[in-house]
Amino acid sequence: MQGQKIQNPKQSTEQKTAQMNDRDFLTDALNMEKFLTDNLNVMAREASHDQLHQDIMSVLDETHQNARGLYNLMFQRGEYAIEPAPAQKVQEVRTQSESMISEQFPQGAPAGMMN
């Protein structure tokens, strides 16, 4: 399976015109969700009031779910192709991540960080 792309058949509804097509609308919506999550992360991190922080976190979670839903829809439509990583590469990245976390938290990583 190594080297084989995982992709659904592309839905050919695209015509080269000045008007936006389905793919353009989906890409625009996904980019907007990415923009929102980036900025909501900053807002959540900097919120000084507990209730405001909780409200922002709720909106942030919903925004992440929306972004994931758009990605999944675009993947189903064949807009994205992914290649499975070889097991050795996955293990290398995991080892690097664990090493970086251990350097950042010499007394031990916070619960759930190394899972």
Image: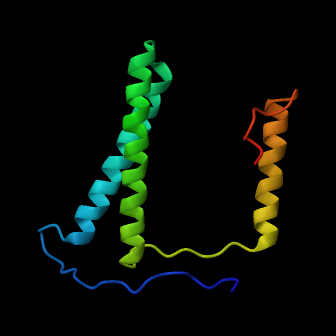
Drawn side of residue 33 relative to residue 6, left or right: left
Asked whether 3 or 64 is in front, the reply is 64
- Image quadrant of residue 6? bottom right
Q: Position of residue 69 (x, y in %)?
A: 38, 60
Q: Position of residue 99 (x, y in %)?
A: 84, 44
Quarter of the figure with the N terminus: bottom right
- Image quadrant of residue 56? top left
Up the image or down, 45 lies above or below 92; here it is above
Up the image or down, 72 lies above or below 111; here it is below
Asked whether 17 or 24 is in front, the reply is 24
> Residue drawn 41% across and 41% down?
37
> Residue drawn 45% across and 12% down?
48
Q: Position of residue 76 (x, y in %)?
A: 40, 76
Which coloring applies here?
rainbow
Q: Position of residue 91 (x, y in %)?
A: 81, 62
Up the image or down, 23 lies above or below 107; here it is below
Drawn side of residue 82 relative to residue 92, left or right: left
Residue sitting at the far right? 107
Drawn side of residue 78 relative to residue 108, left or right: left
Up the image or down, 95 lies above or below 101; here it is below
